[in-house]
């Protein structure tokens, strides 16, 4: 039983619904599709589901890298994370996720911001391995970020 008063199965179902919808939005977004160009949608959806189920108090299923270790090759700034949150909120709304899940998920995301935001320029990014490329996709002029109130 997670600390959201859901069974592990209910938690996994909700997180899977949100993650699936979120990455549908991401992979159809003209900016974010570029950032995720090197990972298959079904792979990142599965990884995100496992990570968030565990982070939300469900079974320990995630066996990937920590957020900090997973993203050193991607230049991430605050605008990017704010826009990601905007897309995540859109996914919550589309699937009708319970408010308690939304609140806790966003709180977890907020806790990781400080390790994900790149304090320097793109030149401070580094590859995790030879197959990586440095991903630098600055916010396009047409992207409007709605700041949370």
Image (cartoon, helix red, strand yellow):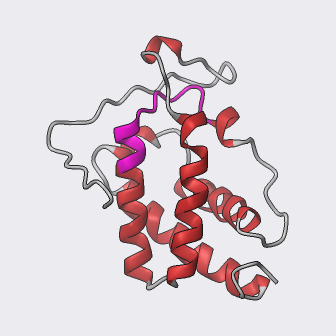
Residue 146 placement, left or right of 50 = left
Residue 31 placement, left or right of 91 = left
The single residue placed furthest to the front in the displayed view is 149
* Residue 66 screen position, x and y as percent: 73, 42
Q: Quadrant of residue 17?
A: bottom right
Say which quadrant the N terminus sits in: bottom right
Looking at the picture, does residue 64 appear above or below residue 48?
A: above
Residue 88 placement, left or right of 6 = left
The mark tally for this picture is 0
Task: State the extent of the magenta-drawn residues as a range.
Answer: 71-82
> Between 45 and 5, which is closer to the camera in this rendering?
5
* Residue 68 screen position, x and y as percent: 66, 35
> Between 145 and 95, which is closer to the camera in this rendering?
145
Which residue corresponds to the image point at 31% horizontal and 61% vertical from the top-left? 149
Which residue corresponds to the image point at 60% horizontal and 49% vertical from the top-left? 111
Which residue corresponds to the image point at 67% horizontal and 18% vertical from the top-left? 130
Residue 80 placement, left or right of 46 = left
Looking at the picture, does residue 112 appear above or below residue 121?
A: below
* Residue 84 screen position, x and y as percent: 41, 52
**Is 81 inside the magenta-drawn segment?**
yes
**Is 49 inside the magenta-drawn segment?**
no
* Residue 30 screen position, x and y as percent: 27, 47
Looking at the picture, does residue 70 appear above or below residue 13?
A: above
Which residue corresponds to the image point at 51% horizontal and 29% vertical from the top-left? 74
């Amino acid at each position: 039983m997670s600390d959201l008063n859901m069974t592990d199965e209910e938690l996994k179902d909700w997180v899977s619904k949100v993650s699936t919808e979120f990455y549908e939005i991401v992979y159809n977004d003209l900016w974010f599709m570029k950032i995720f160009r090197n990972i298959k949608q079904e792979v990142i959806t599965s990884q995100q589901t496992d990570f968030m189920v565990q982070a939300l108090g469900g079974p320990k299923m995630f066996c990937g890298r920590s957020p900090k270790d997973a993203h050193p090759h991607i230049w991430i700034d605050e605008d990017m994370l704010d826009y990601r949150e905007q897309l995540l909120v859109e996914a919550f709304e589309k699937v009708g996720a319970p408010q308690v899940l939304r609140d806790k998920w966003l709180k977890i995301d907020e806790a990781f911001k400080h390790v994900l935001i790149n304090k320097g320029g793109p030149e401070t990014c580094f590859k995790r391995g030879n197959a990586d490329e440095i991903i630098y996709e600055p916010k396009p002029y047409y992207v409007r970020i709605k700041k949370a109130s």
